[in-house]
Image (spheres, grey):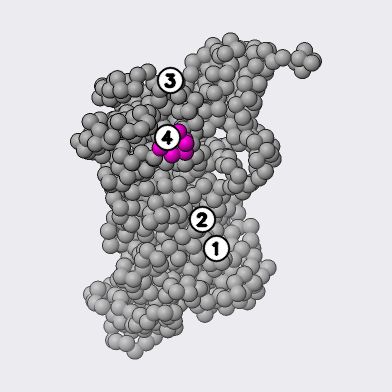
Amino acid sequence: MMALNRLVSSSAGGALLRPLSALSLCTAADTPITVETSIPFVGHKCDPPSRSVTTTATELLSFFRDMALMRRMEIASDSLYKSKLIRGFCHLYDGQEAVAVGMESAITKKDCIITAYRDHCIFLGRGGALVEAFAELMGRRAGCSKGKGGSMHFYKKDSGFYGGHGIVGAQVPLGCGLAFGQKYAKDGTVTFAMYGDGAANQGQLFEALNMAALWDLPAILVCENNHYGMGTAEWRAAKSPAYYKRGDYVPGLKVDGMDVLAVKQACKFAKEYALQNGPLILEMDTYRYHGHSMSDPGSTYRTRDEISGVRQERDPIERDIEKEVRKEVDEAIAQAKESPMPDPSELFKDVYVKGYGVESFGADRKEVRGVLP
Amino acid sequence: MSPWISSASIDTVLQLNRLSTLGLALPVPRRDLARAKLCAKLSLRYMPSCRCARAKSPLCSRQGEHLARARAHLGSFFFVPLWIDLGISESRSRVLRFVDSFVRNSCQKLDRFALIEDVGDCKAKDDWAVAAAVSTWFLWVERFRGSCERVRDALNSALDEEMSADPKVFLMGEEVGEYQGAYKVSKGLLDKYGPDRVRDTPITEAGFTGIGVGAAYYGLRPVVEFMTFNFSMQAIDHIINSAAKSNYMSGGQMSVPIVFRGPNGAAAGVGAQHSQCYAAWYSSCPGLKVLSPYSSEDARGLLKAAIRDPDPVVFLENELLYGESFPVSAEALDSSFCLPIGKAKIEREGKDVTIVAYSRAVGHSLKAADILSKEGISAEVINLRSIRPLDRSTINASVRKTNRLVTVEEGFPQHGVGAEICATVVEESFGYLDAPVERIAGADVPMPYAPNLERMAVPQVEDIVRAAKRACYRSVPMSVTA
């Protein structure tokens, strides 16, 4: 974790110079520490927040652990996919963990998050269980969507996570709708609608942003700029890759998405800003190590040197807690594998909340039919 | 003032909850019947929002009393009923002025009748013109006391009542607020509920539909109005992918209580991009419920059901029906009134052939049934009301009784609603069919503009009559007539 590296090597204070392992045992674990982000924020039509971020040793350790867990989950998903236990689409988040973790640390579960298909780690960040995630990936009964959603459709509505959406860009108007609901209900909470640099070119994003600005919705559009859409470098798809400026009349902030503390600071700022003034765009400068999805090796449009360079220079996670995390992940996978496939009767469940007992049909309606509950 | 008009009676009229339709009857001496019909025709021209209604509506006792007075004054007379659109929340003086000018103008067109200077003077030059003026008020002035209501007002009252009952219900769409709706379905709602609950949107269907669905995720109950369903194509991704599938994909976590509504189907003279029925499109998608009202009672009961339903509902109205008036029962005017989703209505019972239709085609089918009955064919007309879920059992039960089936829809024939009905009957009631199923549908072409071609592209009453006769083996071959 870069922040910790800097912290340990900085001369900010005696206690901070202890090695990482000692931090967890430190009696001053909850003493506030101030750390300066290495890359400044860049604002568009707004004054950027301070680079000095307040944290504690406990928080830093939890960041580290959460990010390491996410990384391990994604690596394990990669293996499960390759061993054909995960089907269809699978979009991995490794490299971008600091965004999910930093964002969570700045908000509450009453705030809403909605994202696209790269959703495993957002689910985990919202308090979702590893078992539920792996079970869903493998299409098992214990999955967070009962095995009926798959990789792209994780939800945890009771913790403010609204999916998990497979259509590029569609989650942004949906997120603005959540913000509309929050404002309508006067809940004093905000929505983070996440999208990638590819989706940033979608027309409906601008439509939703216009309405969010017209109606002062507490919506924060989070552009996770990992610099590549599917098979396409950002410069080939976007005339202006300064995504934080693309809201034009909507203020934006460019954030180092590889620095969990910078993300935390930016999200804290964004929440306060949005509650008072309406929408804001956060561009998280980040990087995905994997290809876009499992069908995209991620190496045809960028060099291996670039990937390994980012790993060495900018990687948000160190590997110290990996053993512990690996064990946790392995156990979750074992448990998920024990969960059976959904019962065939699940086929006709959840089509409607209220199905009026109407008959529904399988492929051969003379053979398979069900009653919609 | 005539003894028949008193300020008290006008107050009674205006006290009725929301006066939007004024029943007006022109009593006419029998000897002047032809003239009276002309008068009615001119009135229709003068005020396009007037329309002749069914004369069958029962009179209340008070109306009967006035009728008796008119009869005493005029002797025997014929009755020309008209309905006048006054809009909601008209002031009393405006109503008075309107009625006054309406009577003057409509009578003025007939040279025999002099301009009536004093509507109160019963001894004016022409008896029946005066009588027309003074009896204006008393006959059928009902909206919420029963008898008739326009589809537009039925939708408006349904929205109003559901918004009033549940603060989570809100309306959004293009021009629903300050402009009062492109078709005035949302008239008066902005004033009553404010801009937070009657939300004007920019012309960006994908964006505002997504926002509506997101608000439904959050637990609100949005009613999203499309100016017409043609524009819902801009937003169909949110209707199908974001709304219809979320509950299933999330294993039941993400219910989406939302209504998408607006005019659908063939309109008049607007060309191919603005004139199309989307019933088959949306009803092919599991997760959606698709309703399509015909009458005012349908409109009220189904829209209320749609808003109360926990799932996404596509609610297909019809522009050409908005101004039509239908008798409405007292029960349907109650605010608790609601129609069941997934149940068809047998509009007319019959024994020789089943005609299944929805929306405006129900009206055509009823007219066709009238014509058929004169030729000894008893047609049963089923108003689907709900396209998804489809009431397969009502359709099949009817076909098992009549053994013949005609389906009627305005949409394209290929993979249409009629095709699905045909399939279900073949699957469930094949042995009962005495004739091949007949499909009447929109022509398999984009909607043409020229009126003659347009007429050919939309099902007409005679098409239904012809098809029903074919199904009954009663069609007369050309060679025989030649």
Is B370 part of what is drawn in magenta?
no
> CA–CA distance between discs 1 and 4?
63 Å
Residue assigned mark 3: B30
Local SS, label 3: helix
Q: Is residue B431 visible?
A: yes
Residue assigned mark 1: A203
User: Depth-wise, is mark 3 or mark 1 nearer the camera?
Assistant: 3
Local SS, label 4: loop
Q: Nearer the viewer, residue B364 or B244?
A: B364
> CA–CA distance between discs 2 and 4?
57 Å
Residue A244 locus on image (x, y percent): 48, 75
Q: Nearer the viewer, residue A104 or A70?
A: A104
Query: Residue sitting at 21 percent across and 38 percent down?
Result: B7
> CA–CA distance between discs 4 and 3?
17 Å
Q: Nearer the viewer, residue A105 or B384?
A: B384
Q: What amino acid is at disc 3?
A: Arg
Q: Subunit of mark 2?
A: B
Q: Subunit of mark 1?
A: A
Residue assigned mark 2: B206
Within-10-Å neighbours for mark 2: few <14, some 14–19, many 20+: many
User: Depth-wise, is mark 2 or mark 3 nearer the camera?
Assistant: 3
Magenta-drawn segment:
B108-114
Q: Subunit of mark 3?
A: B
Query: Residue sitting at 47 percent across and 53 percent down?
Result: B209
Tag 1–tag 4 contact (CB < 8 Å): no
